[in-house]
């Protein structure tokens, strides 16, 4: 459960078995997201064992223009296999230039780009771009081609046969939550902004590229759809293990999506490269502190898993209890209300001491229990659960570990974010609080 009543995307998605990739591009190995470390490895590491070397290495990568503008000056950056790294920084600091130098849409003036140990700085740019997925704002779809044709672009260039291409298009549209039968034959103009963006992601993933470059991909959609796309994308990336370099000027997006964030200042200067919680909790420079802003405490809640927040454990009673028995229990612990659990330990509702008095004639608590104000899974972010708790009159939500009830998050129980939670690992992105329990079957299927 994710606090919206819907199961986590990774568990719930009926994973399409993606068409095996044994064609001209060959097979490749993958490491699950987050298992590889980014370290200050020297050039030797780029030639080391496949599992250890970074998926992308930028070495003193530079771009200057004849008018003297240094768009990017000598940037060094390693992107570990299977991670999403967000390049974030103010407009004009060189984010897009950096990204476009990786697939050579912009030629570097100095430095090297190394993909999986392979120096591609001087390789054929057209071949290179077939190895690298690229997603831009509004999907960058070809308007005169159908959705299916758009997704099939790179497989066709790679010479895949029709059956294989069709199967891959079907799988990918399903993966991004678009029914192939409904949307495959449509033209991009007949899709919403969010749907176009999904097609853009499907197209970029079509040839199963080990590396995906994304340039403000969700910038043109409204905030609610953007949050949904971010969440879906994070689930897809976790499943596929694709390495992603993602440009955004939006710190919240970087925090929600990135395993690591690279904060850049003018001229592509790397100010800090760390996990989101570390960037928010310990800005490395004044520039980063300014950039993350005065509300970084609240932002930090977005990367603080609920499991590290203090939960309260109000009194509990059982659905089968008699009201008089439950009353006595509440009195004995001095409680004014209790969470009602079923015989399996699942929270089914709550009631007040007064409810028990008013319903004294009942034989069990079932008819007396009020609905839970909300539920949240332990691995949600504290910020998303606080948002839920702020929007219900009760001021709290029940916290679950899978099915099991573990306690209550109360809006008064906001944790101390000064303590380091970086080790707690990434949390799932913030969920729009407008999504209420029971609000839909699967996030990939909603728009
Ligand atoms: P960001 O993506 O961070 O907004 P860009 O990478 O697009 O920034 O641009 C970095 C810098 O390079 C900007 O200052 C921009 O004005 C400059 N720039 C881009 N193209 C040219 C060009 N053809 N000539 C001179 N400067 C350029």
Image (spheres, rainbow, N blue to C red):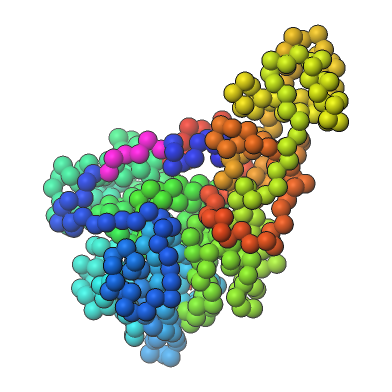
Query: Who is closer to the viewer here, 443 or 78?
Result: 78
Query: Who is closer to the viewer here, 312 or 368?
Result: 312
Instruction: Point out residue 418 in the picture as x, y percentages from the top left corner.
Output: 69, 62
Residue 281 appears in the picture as rendered: yes
Instruction: Point out residue 28 in the picture as x, y percentages from the top left corner.
Output: 24, 57
Instruction: Point out residue 311 in the picture as x, y percentages from the top left corner.
Output: 70, 43
At x 47%, y 56%, the residue is 218
At x 64%, y 73%, the residue is 289
At x 40%, y 72%, the residue is 78
* View quadrant of ligand 1: bottom left
Q: Quadrant of residue 27?
A: bottom left
Q: As displayed, is residue 78 above or below residue 361? A: below
Residue 384 appears in the picture as rendered: no
Q: Quadrant of the N terminus?
A: top right
At x 64%, y 28%, the residue is 347
Q: Quadrant of residue 158?
A: bottom left
Instruction: Point out residue 259 in the picture as x, y percentages from the top left corner.
Output: 48, 60
Report the magenta residues as a range. Answer: 13-18
Magenta stretch: dominant secondary structure:
loop
The tally of labels here is 0
């Amino acid at each position: 459960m994710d606090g919206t009543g819907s199961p986590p995307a990774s568990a719930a998605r009926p994973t399409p078995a993606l068409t095996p990739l044994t064609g001209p591009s060959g097979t490749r190995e993958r490491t699950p997201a987050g298992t590889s470390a980014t370290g200050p490895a020297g050039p030797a590491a780029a030639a080391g064992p496949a599992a250890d070397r970074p998926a992308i290495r930028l070495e003193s990568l530079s771009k200057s223009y004849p008018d003297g503008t240094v768009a990017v000056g000598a940037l060094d950056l390693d992107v570990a296999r299977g991670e999403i790294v967000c390049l974030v920084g103010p407009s004009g600091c060189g984010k897009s230039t950096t990204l476009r130098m990786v697939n050579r849409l912009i030629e570097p003036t100095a430095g090297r780009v190394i993909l999986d140990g392979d120096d591609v700085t001087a390789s054929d740019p057209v071949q290179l771009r077939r190895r690298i997925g690229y997603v831009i704002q509004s999907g960058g779809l070809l308007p005169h081609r159908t959705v299916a044709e758009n997704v099939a672009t790179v497989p066709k260039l790679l010479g895949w046969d029709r059956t294989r291409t069709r199967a891959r298009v079907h799988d990918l549209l399903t993966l991004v939550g678009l029914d192939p039968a409904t949307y495959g034959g449509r033209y991009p103009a007949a899709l919403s902004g969010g749907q176009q963006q999904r097609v853009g992601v499907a197209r970029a993933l079509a040839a199963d590229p080990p590396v995906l470059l994304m340039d403000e991909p969700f910038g043109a959609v409204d905030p609610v759809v953007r949050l949904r796309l971010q969440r879906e994308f994070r689930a897809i990336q976790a499943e596929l293990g694709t390495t992603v370099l993602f440009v955004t000027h939006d710190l919240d997006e970087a925090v929600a999506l990135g395993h690591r964030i690279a904060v850049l200042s003018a001229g592509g200067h790397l100010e800090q490269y760390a996990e989101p919680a570390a960037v928010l909790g310990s800005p490395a420079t004044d520039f980063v502190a300014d950039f993350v802003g005065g509300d970084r405490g609240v932002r930090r809640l977005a990367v603080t898993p609920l499991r590290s927040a203090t939960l309260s454990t109000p009194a509990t009673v059982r659905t089968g209890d008699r009201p008089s028995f439950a009353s006595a229990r509440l009195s004995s612990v001095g409680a004014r209300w209790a969470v009602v659990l079923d015989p399996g330990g699942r929270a089914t509702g709550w009631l007040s001491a007064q409810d028990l008095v008013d319903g004294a004639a009942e034989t069990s608590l079932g008819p007396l229990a009020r609905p839970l104000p909300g539920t949240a899974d332990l691995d949600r972010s504290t910020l998303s659960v606080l948002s839920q708790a702020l929007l219900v009159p009760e001021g709290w939500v029940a916290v679950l570990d899978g099915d099991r009830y573990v306690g209550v998050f109360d809006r008064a129980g906001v944790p101390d974010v000064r303590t380091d939670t970086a080790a707690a690992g990434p949390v799932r992105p913030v969920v729009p609080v407008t999504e209420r329990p029971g609000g839909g079957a699967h996030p990939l299927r909603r728009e």
